Image: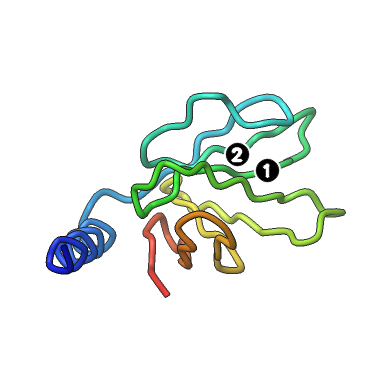
Amino acid sequence: MMITAKVRKWWRNVLARFGPRRRLRIIEGDSLPSRMPRRDLVLARDDGEDWCVGMRCPCGCGYVVELLVVTEAKPRWDVRVDVNGTPTLTPSVWLQKGCHSHFWVRDGRVHWC
C-alpha cells in the first residue's frame, strides 16, 4: 500500500512538471458550473466583475476547489493570466478539509508544497 502512494505521488509530480499547462476558462455568472473541467481553472465573471476561481483538486481526489477573488472577500486570491492563457494564483492553496493538499498554481503548473 505504501508503494502505491509513493508511485501516485511521483506520477502526479511528473505530470505537474512536464504535462500540459492548465488554462483559464472564463464563464459568465457569479458561481462555478456544476461540471468542472478535468484540468483547467474556471473564472466566474458577472457584469465584468470577477467572483471566484475554481478547479478540481490536482491530487485527483475529485474535490472542487473554489477560491474567492472578489475584493471584499477574506481570504481572497489574485489570479493573473499571461498572454498564452496560463493562470497564476496567489497566495498558495491549502485545503483545510478533505485531502489537505497544499500547492501553488504558477504559469499554469501545479507546484506542491
The residue drawn where x is 21% and y is 63% is: 5
Q: Element type at marker 1?
A: strand
Q: Are marks 1 and 2 in contact (CB under 8 Å)?
A: yes
> How far across and down, in percent of the image, does residue 80 sit?
58, 56
Q: Amino acid at mark 2?
A: Leu
Which residue position holds label 2?
43
Q: Which image quadrant: the C terminus? A: bottom left
Q: CA distance from mark 1 to mark 2?
A: 6 Å
Q: Amino acid at mark 1?
A: Cys
Residue that extends furthest to the bottom in the rendered view of this protein: 113
The residue drawn where x is 41% and y is 48% is: 84
The residue drawn where x is 14% and y is 63% is: 7
Looking at the image, residue 22 sits to the left or right of residue 3; the answer is right
User: In the drawing, what numbered circle is on residue 52?
Assistant: 1
54 or 100: nearer the viewer: 100
Looking at the image, residue 89 sits to the left or right of residue 4; the answer is right
Q: Which image quadrant: the N terminus? A: bottom left
The residue drawn where x is 40% and y is 55% is: 108
> How far across and down, in percent of the image, does residue 58 sit?
38, 52
